[in-house]
Amino acid sequence: MSDLLWDEVKCFFDPDVMGALPDLRVPDASVEDWQAVLDLVADRGWECRYSVGERVLAVPRAEAVLSRPAGAERPVLRVWPDAEVLVIFRFHADDEVDFDVDLRELQGQERLDVFCGFLREIGSRLGKPVLMDPEGDCGNPVLGYDVEAERVVLLEEPQIR
């Protein structure tokens, strides 16, 4: 059974409403949480590519990524939980796991189910909520993984159009 139904939530996946790249985050995280995410990617065998600038490198330990010197280039980890769905982790800070998805890749029930499954995987591995905010509007999540419910839930009522 699907966590969310496309017809009920499609407004939250409209790039014109939410921005093409909504902000996804796990607040109150730690270096250990970041490492758990890296381990999850490896455990699930998801295709991934870690890069710093134009250089593609092996995925390092989280503490190495997050302890880079001030002013150093920010690394990016691209993960494909599905061949047609790309998730990009940015490593902005050690106290928040942050990533984005392109809403144009998440159209329809099948892709929504892949997305919700990905959020469930991260949230259940960390035992923490995973929140989605409109692009550039951090702190106002519209949906997210609920640890108690063990599923992705709405945090704001969708606007019916």
Image (cartoon, rainbow, N blue to C red):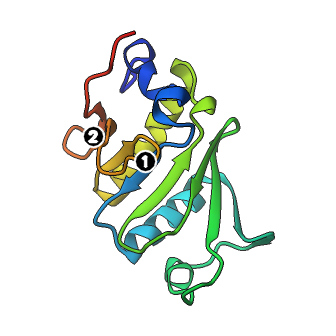
Tell me where residue 105 sits by quadrant. Answer: top right
Q: Which mark is residue 150?
A: 2
The image shows a total of numbered marks equal to 2
Q: Residue at x 46, y 59 (%)?
A: 98
Q: What amino acid is found at the position of numbered circle 2 in the picture? A: Glu
**Which secondary structure, mark 1?**
helix
Vertically, is 9 above or below 31? above
Find the distance from the CA under tag 2 to the CA under tag 1: 10 Å
Which residue is found at the position 55% from the left and 22% from the top? 110
Relative side of 151 to 22, left or right:
left
Relative to 148, residue 103 above or below: above
Do labels 2 and 1 touch, CB within 8 Å?
no
Task: Judge whether 6 appears above or below 91 on screen.
Answer: above
Q: Residue furthest left?
A: 148
Of 78 and 100, nearer the camera is 100
Is disc 2 surrounded by few (<14), some (14 to 19) or many (20+) residues within 10 Å? Answer: some
Indicate left or right for 104 with 66 as reference. right
Please tell me whether residue 67 is drawn above or below residue 42 in the rendered image: below
Q: Which residue was labeled with disc 1?
A: 121
**In which quadrant of the rendered view does residue 48 lie?**
bottom right
* Residue 95 percent across, percent down from the top left: 35, 71
Q: Residue at x 44, y 66 (%)?
A: 36
> Can you name the residue that lies furthest to the bottom here?
69
The first of marks 2 and 1 along the sequence is: 1
Q: Residues within 10 Å of mark 1 (few under 14, many from 20)?
A: many
Q: Residue at x 38, y 65 (%)?
A: 96
In the drawing, does residue 136 fall left or right of residue 46?
A: left
Image position, residue 27 (x, y; %) = 31, 60
The secondary element bearing badge 2 is classed as loop
Which quarter of the figure is the C terminus placed in?
Answer: top left
Q: Position of residue 125 (x, y in %)?
A: 37, 56
